[in-house]
Each structure stands twice: as structure tokens, then as C-alpha cells.
């Protein structure tokens, strides 16, 4: 096969990667790995990995523009790291797959791909952002795999298709060597989809619904950059005096909107991440007002707050404060996983232990925005058997879709309904099977959202065993590499022995 044809396959794969980054086209993920693997397998040696890296770099650099929130030139260095990591499973495939035959040879690439995604999520600040499984949002039967293997099982199926198609391609799609791996993959996918469909069909319908409302951040109340300066805690006395009336209006906004929703029938009201901004010295007075509102209206109030300690090294407490219908503070939780960079420099991070409280609505808990991108952190919710969790968030235009959709997978993994309250993003509610109950886009002008949220969790295997499937993939990839390297070492020794005896 000519090099030009191989490069065309790489180009198609790279274009599909760029589409995956920027658009809601689930099939693009399946095409991306299939064509990238085809292109890399049909090029010789080191040239294959070199061209593959170039294709991945171009796709990720274009696709992630605006999504990765850092400027040049650091952006291009980060993309280089991501491209290098994405190329590793292809290198493992080239090293180890050729030493196996049949279906076993097709398992090398998906095992290596999941191992790469999983270890990257543990080692890089981006957490699970970019994991291929998230591209399959909306395919509810397939999404149910997350209740058993986490998101890693979905990524495995996507990468496995690439391997079996390429093996069949090499056999010109003829004969048993081509058919058996394809049939094995199709059988596995059929079982997954049938099982997922059954799980959805048998999902109980007797969950107790609670009318919940989200109140989001008001549009145009603050000038560009003002909120950032407040949260950085570096304000002059004149700036404090100038901004204090705006903060007073912000406080009135959230309390008045919450009162309206309560009188409209909401029993639970949630605010977005750092939606309510208050100087530390003013917090007691504000909390007294909020507690009075919760008690008078008989609501549970989950307040996303940013409490600012002016002049401190890490001035902002990014937290959720939960009030019960008696106006009591049930818990106050600090965000545990700040986004690397600006946010990590200004907020006081929590200890990683999610809060739990038995309330009139059931066992409740909360995490905040980026916390939700860490399956191992959120797994505490499933382990504790929570009935409902609140996820205040604050996104930006480029990530609003994917970040919202990622939250649905956490609900499925832990079997726990979710209420997501977002500013500059999408608010929504999901049941334990990831079915959307309501959604509202802040960028469309929506300042409130109402949903009937089912309360009550269901047990999942993922909550019990965690990332066992991913760790098995890590072990499998390491074993395949070790076996291949050992085989090459022995072959080299045999060649040397033959040469020396000749």
C-alpha cells in the first residue's frame, strides 16, 4: 500500500478526532480510532508513529482551541503531551499485537487505549476530560455499561472495534480470520446493548419525585473581569466600596428568586458554583437571611457560594452550604479538586471527603464542578448509598455541552440521581440511569430551571469495585508489552547465537 493512501487514512482519523472535540457526533469517535489505526499499521516502523503523532497533534490543537483554558505557548506544549499520550496505545499495538493471532491480537489495542486514558486521568490535571466514552452521551443502553465498568468499558468497545476492523481489513474482509474477531465484537456489543436496554426497561418507576429548582447567576449585573477580581481577593478599599452595592443586589437576586421558586412549589432550590459571592465579614448576616428564608418557605436550600477573605493568599472558599427546611446548616463543603492554574491559586481546597446528611428529602450530598470529573472521588456517593446529589458548576461556552454530559455518567456509575446547577453552562437533572429530566442553558438566557427529580439511589457494581476494569486493562497492557519486549530480546539473542556459530 502506498504511503499516500496511509496518510489519507490518518487524515480521516485526525479530522474525526477534531470533530469529537468540538461537536456532538458520537459516530466520529468510532471512525477516529479505526482510521488512525489503519493509517499507522500500513506505514513502516518509526515513520508510522511519527506521522501518527503529527496527525494527532494537528487534530488536538485545532479541536481543543478554547476548550483547554490556557494561552499560547503553553497551550501547544500541553497539546504535544496529549498527542504523545494518545500515540502510546498505537505503539503498544505495533509492538505486541503482531505477536498474537486471532481475537487475542485484537485485544491489545483496546486494552492499551483504556490503560492510557485511565492513567492520564489519574496523572494529568485534566482528569477524565477527553475520555472517548463521553462522546456516546445519548446512547442510553450503551451508557449503562458505566454502572459496571465505569466509563472505561465504553472506551474499550470503541477501541476494540478499531482493532477488529483493521484485522478484517488486513484479510480483505474475507475468511475466518476476518470474520471471527468481528463476530466476537458484535456479540459483545449486542450483549451490552441488550443488557443496557433491559436495565432501562426494568428501572423502577416508583421513585419519589421532588420538585427542584435551579437559580443561576444574573446576566450583566457585573462588568467583565469584576467577578474575577473579587474572587482573587485583591481589591482596594475604593473597589470594595464600589462593588459592595452590586454584591447586595446579587444577594437579593438569589434570595428573591429562591423565594419565588419555593412559592411555585419547589421543595429544593440549588445555586451554581460561586453563584452567591460574599465578603467573609458579611457572611454571617447573609446566612441569617438565607436560613430565615429556608425556614419560612420550608425548603432545602443548596447554596453555591464564594466567600472571599480579602488579602489572604488563597482568599476564596468555593463551597456548598446546605440548609434544611428548619433553616439549620446541614453541611458546608469546600471544593476538593480545583482546576489547575488560576482557580487553584485562589481557592481553599477541601480534603476530598464528600459530605453526607440524612434530610427530609433523603440522604443528600454534594460535589462542585470539576470534582465531578473524578470518578474515584464521586464514587463516595455510590458507596454511601446517597439518594440525591447536588453539583453546582460554572463553565464557559466552549465546554458547556461536554461538561454537562459528563455528569450523566457519574449518575449512572453511582446509581444516584443528580441535580446540576450551572452558571455559564447547562443546568440539568438526571435519574440514576442517566436519563435527563430537565435542562436549561444559561447562555440562552435561562436564569431558572425547574425539574421533577426522582429521589432514591440504586446499587451499582462500579460503586462496589471502582476502577477494577481499568486496572485490569493497565495490567493487560503492561503484560502485552513485557511479553513483546521479552520475545524480541530472545529473538535477538538467538540471532546472535546463530551468527556466532556460523
Image (cartoon, rainbow, N blue to C red):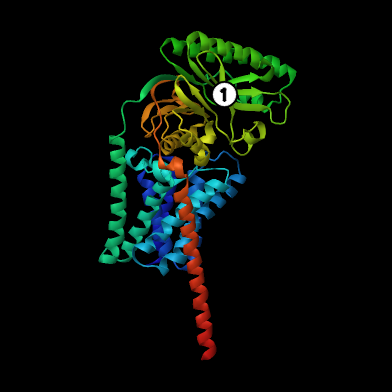
The residue shown at (35%, 60%) is 166
Q: Position of residue 174 (x, y in %)?
A: 25, 65
- Residue most extreme to the top: 296
Q: Is residue 315 above or below residue 119?
A: above
The quarter of the displayed image where residue 143 is located: top left
Q: Is residue 421 visible?
A: no
Write down the residue under mark 1.
Answer: 331
Q: Is residue 63 above or below residue 285?
A: below
Label 1 environment density (alpha carbons within 10 Å; few <14, some 14–19, many ≥20): some
Q: Is residue 134 visible?
A: yes
Q: Is residue 200 left or right of residue 412?
A: left
Q: Position of residue 480 (x, y in %)?
A: 46, 63
Q: Is residue 24 above or below residue 452?
A: below
Q: Is residue 482 left or right of residue 19?
A: right
- Residue most extreme to the left: 175
The residue shown at (37%, 22%) is 209
Q: Position of residue 156 (x, y in %)?
A: 40, 51
Q: 289 or 161, which lies in front? A: 289
Q: Position of residue 66 (x, y in %)?
A: 52, 38
Q: 225 or 108, which lies in front? A: 108
The quarter of the displayed image where residue 304 is located: top right
The residue shown at (27%, 57%) is 183
Amino acid at each position: 500500500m502506498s504511503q499516500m493512501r496511509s496518510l489519507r487514512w490518518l487524515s480521516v482519523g485526525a479530522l474525526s478526532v477534531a470533530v469529537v472535540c468540538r461537536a456532538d457526533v458520537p459516530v466520529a469517535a468510532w471512525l477516529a480510532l479505526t482510521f488512525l489505526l489503519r493509517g499507522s499499521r500500513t506505514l513502516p516502523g518509526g515513520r508510522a508513529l511519527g506521522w501518527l503523532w503529527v496527525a494527532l497533534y494537528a487534530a488536538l490543537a485545532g479541536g481543543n482551541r478554547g476548550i483547554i483554558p490556557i494561552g499560547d505557548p503553553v497551550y501547544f506544549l500541553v497539546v504535544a503531551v496529549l498527542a504523545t499520550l494518545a500515540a502510546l496505545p498505537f505503539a503498544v499495538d505495533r509492538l505486541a499485537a503482531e505477536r498474537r493471532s486471532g481475537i487475542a491480537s485484537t485485544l491489545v489495542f483496546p486494552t492499551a487505549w483504556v490503560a492510557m486514558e485511565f492513567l492520564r486521568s489519574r496523572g494529568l490535571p485534566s482528569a477524565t476530560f477527553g475520555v472517548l466514552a463521553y462522546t456516546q452521551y445519548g446512547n442510553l443502553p450503551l451508557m449503562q455499561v458505566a454502572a459496571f465498568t465505569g466509563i472505561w468499558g465504553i472506551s474499550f468497545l470503541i477501541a476494540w472495534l478499531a482493532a477488529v476492523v483493521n484485522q478484517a481489513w488486513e484479510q480483505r474482509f474475507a475468511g475466518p480470520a476476518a470474520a471471527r474477531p468481528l463476530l466476537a465484537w458484535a456479540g459483545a456489543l449486542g450483549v451490552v446493548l441488550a443488557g443496557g436496554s433491559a436495565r432501562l426497561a426494568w428501572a423502577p418507576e416508583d421513585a419519589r419525585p421532588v420538585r427542584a429548582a435551579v437559580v443561576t447567576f444574573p446576566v450583566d449585573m457585573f462588568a467583565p473581569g469584576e467577578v474575577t477580581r473579587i474572587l482573587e481577593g485583591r481589591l482596594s478599599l475604593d473597589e470594595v466600596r464600589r462593588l459592595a452595592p452590586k454584591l447586595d443586589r446579587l444577594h437579593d437576586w438569589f434570595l428573591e428568586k429562591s423565594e419565588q421558586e419555593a412559592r411555585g412549589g419547589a421543595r429544593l432550590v440549588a445555586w451554581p458554583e460561586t453563584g452567591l459571592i460574599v465578603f467573609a465579614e458579611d457572611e454571617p448576616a447573609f446566612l441569617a437571611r438565607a436560613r430565615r428564608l429556608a425556614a419560612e418557605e420550608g425548603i432545602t436550600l443548596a447554596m453555591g457560594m464564594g466567600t472571599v477573605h480579602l488579602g489572604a493568599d488563597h482568599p476564596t472558599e468555593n463551597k456548598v452550604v446546605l440548609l434544611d427546611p428548619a433553616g439549620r446548616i446541614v453541611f458546608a463543603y469546600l471544593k476538593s479538586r480545583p482546576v489547575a492554574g488560576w482557580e487553584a491559586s485562589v481557592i481553599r481546597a477541601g480534603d476530598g471527603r464528600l459530605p453526607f446528611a440524612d434530610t427530609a428529602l433523603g440522604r443528600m450530598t454534594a460535589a462542585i464542578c470539576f470534582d465531578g470529573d473524578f470518578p474515584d472521588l464521586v464514587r463516595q456517593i455510590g458507596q454511601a448509598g446517597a439518594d440525591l446529589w447536588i453539583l453546582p458548576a460554572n463553565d464557559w461556552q466552549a465546554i458547556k455541552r461536554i461538561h454537562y454530559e459528563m455528569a450523566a455518567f457519574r449518575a449512572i456509575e453511582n446509581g444516584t440521581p443528580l441535580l446540576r446547577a450551572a452558571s455559564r453552562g447547562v443546568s440539568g437533572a438526571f435519574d440514576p440511569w442517566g436519563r435527563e429530566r430537565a435542562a436549561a442553558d444559561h447562555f440562552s438566557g435561562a436564569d431558572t430551571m425547574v425539574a421533577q427529580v426522582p429521589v432514591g439511589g440504586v446499587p451499582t457494581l462500579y460503586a462496589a469495585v471502582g476502577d477494577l476494569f481499568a486496572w485490569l486493562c493497565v495490567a493487560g497492557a503492561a503484560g502485552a508489552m513485557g511479553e513483546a519486549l521479552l520475545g524480541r530480546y530472545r529473538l535477538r539473542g538467538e540471532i546472535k547465537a546463530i551468527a556466532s556459530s556460523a
